[in-house]
Image: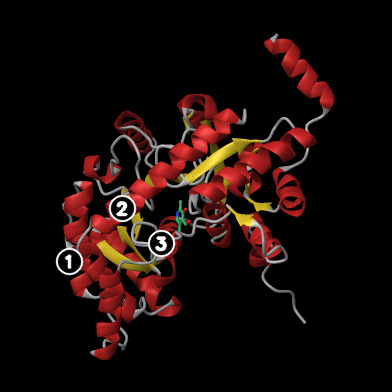
Amino acid sequence: MKPLSGNVQGIQRSPIRQILDSAKAYPDAIELEIGQPDFDPPVHVIEAAVDAARNRYTGYTANAGIMELREAICTKLARENALQVGTDEIMVTVGAMQAIFSSMAVLLEPGDQILLPDPGYGNFESAARLLNAEPIYYATLPERGFEPDFERLEQLVTPRTKAMLINSPSNPTGAVFTREVLMRCLAFCQKHDLYMISDETYDQLLFEGTHHSPAKWDDEGRVISVFTTSKTYAMTGWRIGYAVANPEIVRQMTKIQEPTVSCVNTVAQHAAVAALLGPQDCVAYMREQYRVRRDVAVQVAKELGLKVSNPRGAFYMLVDISAQDKCSLDFSLDLLDQERVAVGPGCAFGPICDRYVRISFCASESDLRKGLTRLARHLSASTPLSRILSATATVA
Ligand SMILES: Cc1ncc(COP(=O)(O)O)c(C=O)c1O
């Protein structure tokens, strides 16, 4: 038989999925590897879904989503993101991931380059590769709170660069870009005539500071903003995200719906209206729980002598494992096998990140404490004695 698409075969399986699958063999393992909220979706959202099904809102919808949801999204964007947009600037998507994929599909020709953050969410690269575009990583620096290195960014631009993707708050670093950094990213895109995809999956999950949507400073229509109900309302499986862009981009993106998914699940669209327009105290409650867990995790890590990122948003923390010699996937597999703790291998998030593993705060305080304690024990057991002695000598 003729070979399958080389392009698809070239896509790597996510190392996080590899850990998830391996963890099934250890039912007693502490699971800190996945960004799956451990809260239930709000009751009024579940009721809205049941009502929608009972009232037979069960057929196809418009490709761009039901008007009621697009209007609810406009209300949310004005309320939370200081964005004043019309319904013709919105497309409802199958989670944030489809909004990102469709944005890239509308912007990128085969061979075009897109600048992606390193560390960054691994699916960005896979999406670009599926479209035969070339992902180019730009470093965000741990020593500067994982902000982009703008000098190096300039050197990465070529005539083939078409877009830059930013993600604040960031998965996996937890960094939140300040207003100044975001404005600098936008100015960089304007200078080089690049589109910007702004992944704002965690826009309502900030522990400190303020979230800014760069689209509010964009008067040319070069920013595509991506949002989702997945994390904010613990609705990952409901698959409701949305892209916000200028009407022409939305018109083009909408064409992708028909031959791919037709439309997004109708019942879930009705439930998302309830999520966006209903009581918002559930959002504040979950955010506060994640903040408490962040504080516990950072404190415990400090007590254990672990070097960690300083998460100001999203619900992840990076732990530096560079004292030992193994790659992050092997380290994570060993940790699971020997200490029964599942973590996200950093290699899932780009080249820089292989010196880290990612911890998710979608777990109880007690699991975070136990998990970090075992991780620290495993890290020190895996660190060559000579390195521990030289570190001690340096301190002395
Ligand atoms: C940065 C980032 N973007 C996009 C997504 C995908 O979100 P969704 O489940 O809404 O497709 C995730 C999910 O973890 C994410 O962390």
Query: Where is 296 relative to 395, above or below?
Result: below
Amino acid at dot 1: Glu
Residue 144 in view: yes
Eyeballing the image, is 325 above or below 1? above
- In the image, 303 versus 130, the foreground residue is 303
> Is residue 65 something one can see in this rendering?
no
Circles 2 and 1: CB atoms closer than 8 Å? no
Q: In which quarter of the image is the C terminus?
A: top right
Position above or below: 269 against 185: below
Numbered badge on residue 285: 2
Q: Residue at x 68, y 12 (%)?
A: 395
**300 displayed left or right of 226:** right
Q: Earlier in the sequence, mark 2 or mark 1?
A: 1
Disc 1 or disc 3, which is closer to the eye? 3
Side of 359 relative to 314 (left or right):
right
List the residue tagged with mark 3.
39
Q: Position of residue 79 (x, y in %)?
A: 17, 52
Work out whether residue 112 or residue 185 is closer to the camera in this orientation and state it: 185
Q: Mark 2 against mark 1, which lies toward the viewer?
A: 2
Ligand 1 lies in quarter: bottom left
Measured as percent of width and height from the top left, residue 219 is found at 21, 43
Please, what is the three-letter code of the amino acid marked with disc 2? Tyr
- Residue 306 lies in what quarter of the image? top right
Q: Mark 1 points at which residue?
A: 71
**Which amino acid does the dot numbered 3 rest on?**
Phe
What residue is at 34 percent from the left and 49 percent from the top?
287
- Tell me the crowding category of disc 3: few under 14, some 14 to 19, or many 20 or more residues within 10 angstroms, Cα based: some
- N-terminal label among 1 and 3: 3
Q: Pointer 2: residues within 10 angstroms few (<14), some, or many (20+)?
A: few
